[in-house]
């Protein structure tokens, strides 16, 4: 790790690390640091609202996520992130007939000065 860089750990799966795990190479470390600092700076300037959506599809769980986000984006602006909290399916004759996913979706609130 470069001496001049400071490592910022924004990921829950890396909790407890005060430096990057050994399996991360030096070029990744520098890029990771810069990206995480940019992400932190960008995220700190915004306020988000979080809602829960349920998407469904007969094709796949990924398509169910896509369907939920596509529909929500028709009426909700500034959707920036999502988290899948539940996945379930309906089985017919031993095969998946229908996928359903529960999403937490975050969207950025607009500044009051924009109105």
Image: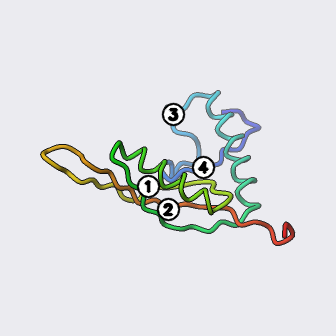
| Foreground: disc 1 or disc 3 | 1
Separation of residues labelled 4 and 1 (CA atoms): 22 Å
Which residue matches tag 1? 84
Which residue matches tag 2? 104
Separation of residues labelled 3 and 4 (CA atoms): 14 Å
Q: Position of residue 29 (x, y in %)?
A: 63, 34
Say what secondary structure mark 1 lies in: strand
Separation of residues labelled 1 and 3 (CA atoms): 29 Å
Q: Earlier in the sequence, mark 1 or mark 2?
A: 1
Which residue matches tag 3? 22
Separation of residues labelled 2 and 4 (CA atoms): 22 Å
Q: Position of residue 17 (x, y in %)?
A: 53, 48
- On screen, residue 85 versus residue 12, left or right, reads left
Numbered tag placed on residue 9 in the rendering: 4
- On screen, residue 29 versus residue 71, left or right, reads right
Quadrant for the C terminus, please. bottom right
């Amino acid at each position: 790790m470069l001496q001049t860089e400071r490592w910022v750990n924004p990921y829950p799966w890396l909790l407890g690390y005060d430096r990057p795990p050994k399996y991360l190479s030096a070029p990744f470390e520098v890029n990771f640091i810069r990206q995480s600092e940019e992400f932190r700076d960008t995220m700190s300037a915004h306020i988000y609202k979080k809602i829960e959506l349920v998407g469904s599809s007969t094709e796949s769980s990924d398509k169910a996520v896509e369907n939920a986000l596509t529909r929500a984006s028709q009426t909700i602006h500034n959707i920036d992130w999502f988290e899948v909290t539940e996945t379930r399916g309906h089985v017919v004759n031993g095969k998946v007939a229908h996928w359903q996913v529960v999403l937490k979706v975050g969207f950025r609130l607009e500044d009051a000065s924009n109105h």
